[in-house]
């Protein structure tokens, strides 16, 4: 039998932050290179496949256009993958779901870190059926080790010392031309997910 690894979490990470406390932290957003990709031509233009093939740890997220009809759920409009050097945002659909994405989502040796990843996976499978592997839910890790904050915004405050904006969360992600604010929001969520897993590994939480 294998015993579970016991995690000793420093007391400072066990604090439950109030909304007022969270708002005292500085806001950060991703300030690196972002590629918004909506076609195979754009894939080639940005050299996206090569950028993805060279990475083994991704920040992962999706954005879905809100539905205002009861019982109707839309599939994701965006899939974000953050690498060490760049964030790639794919405007996905049944007509545009590149093979390299399918490969990454099914590769157990390429880690994809995010929060509530199961919901994202189920949404993506409405566009393309794949066998998911290598996903790491940092929200689940935080619960398992006893942290009081498990959402992306709270974890960023707790482990990284800054907060992220959620102002665009319910905006229209299905439109062809996204605003600069939407693009930064989507890129930041994926980037923070990657940074959180790196920090968790640094703190021996995984």
Image (spheres, helix red, strand yellow):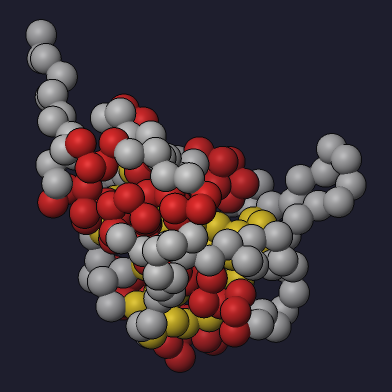
Query: How many numbered circles does the render carry?
Result: 0
Q: Is residue 179 above or below residue 29?
A: below
Q: Nearer the viewer, residue 161 or 20?
A: 20
Q: Nearer the viewer, residue 73 or 188?
A: 188
Q: Is residue 38 left or right of residue 99?
A: right
Q: Is residue 63 left or right of residue 56?
A: right
Q: Is residue 151 left or right of residue 92?
A: left
Q: Position of residue 117 (x, y in %)?
A: 47, 43
Q: Is residue 182 above or below residue 190?
A: below
Q: Is residue 131 left or right of residue 32?
A: right
Q: Residue furthest bottom?
A: 45
User: Where is the C terminus found, in terms of image quarters?
Assistant: top left
Q: Residue at x 43, y 62 (%)?
A: 24
Q: Residue at x 44, y 53 (%)?
A: 21
Q: Is residue 53 above or below residue 74?
A: below
Q: Residue at x 30, y 60 (%)?
A: 161
Q: Residue furthest top?
A: 1
User: Where is the N terminus found, in terms of image quarters?
Assistant: top left
Q: Position of residue 197 (x, y in %)?
A: 27, 51
Q: Is residue 129 visible?
A: no
Q: Residue at x 76, y 45 (%)?
A: 73
The quadrant in which residue 84 appears is: bottom left
Q: Nearer the viewer, residue 123 or 194?
A: 194
Q: Position of residue 193 (x, y in %)?
A: 37, 56
Q: Residue furthest right?
A: 69
The quadrant in which residue 172 appears is: bottom right
Q: Is residue 1 visible?
A: yes
């Amino acid at each position: 039998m294998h015993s579970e690894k016991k995690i000793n979490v420093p007391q400072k990470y066990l604090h439950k932050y109030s909304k007022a406390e969270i708002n005292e932290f500085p806001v950060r957003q991703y300030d690196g290179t972002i590629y918004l990709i909506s076609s195979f031509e754009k894939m080639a233009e940005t050299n996206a496949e090569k950028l993805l093939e060279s990475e083994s740890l991704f920040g992962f997220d999706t954005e879905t256009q809100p539905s205002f009809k009861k019982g109707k759920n839309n599939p994701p409009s965006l899939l974000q993958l953050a690498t060490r050097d760049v964030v790639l945002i794919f405007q996905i659909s049944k007509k545009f779901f590149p093979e390299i994405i399918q490969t990454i989502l099914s590769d157990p040796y390429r880690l994809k870190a995010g929060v509530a990843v199961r919901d994202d996976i189920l949404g993506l499978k409405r566009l393309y059926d794949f066998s998911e592997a290598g996903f790491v839910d940092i929200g689940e890790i935080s619960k398992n080790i006893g942290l009081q904050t498990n959402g992306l915004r709270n974890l960023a405050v707790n482990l990284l010392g800054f907060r992220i904006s959620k102002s665009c969360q319910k905006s229209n992600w299905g439109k062809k031309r996204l605003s600069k604010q939407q693009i930064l929001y989507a890129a930041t969520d994926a980037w923070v997910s990657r940074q959180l897993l790196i920090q968790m590994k640094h703190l021996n939480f995984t």
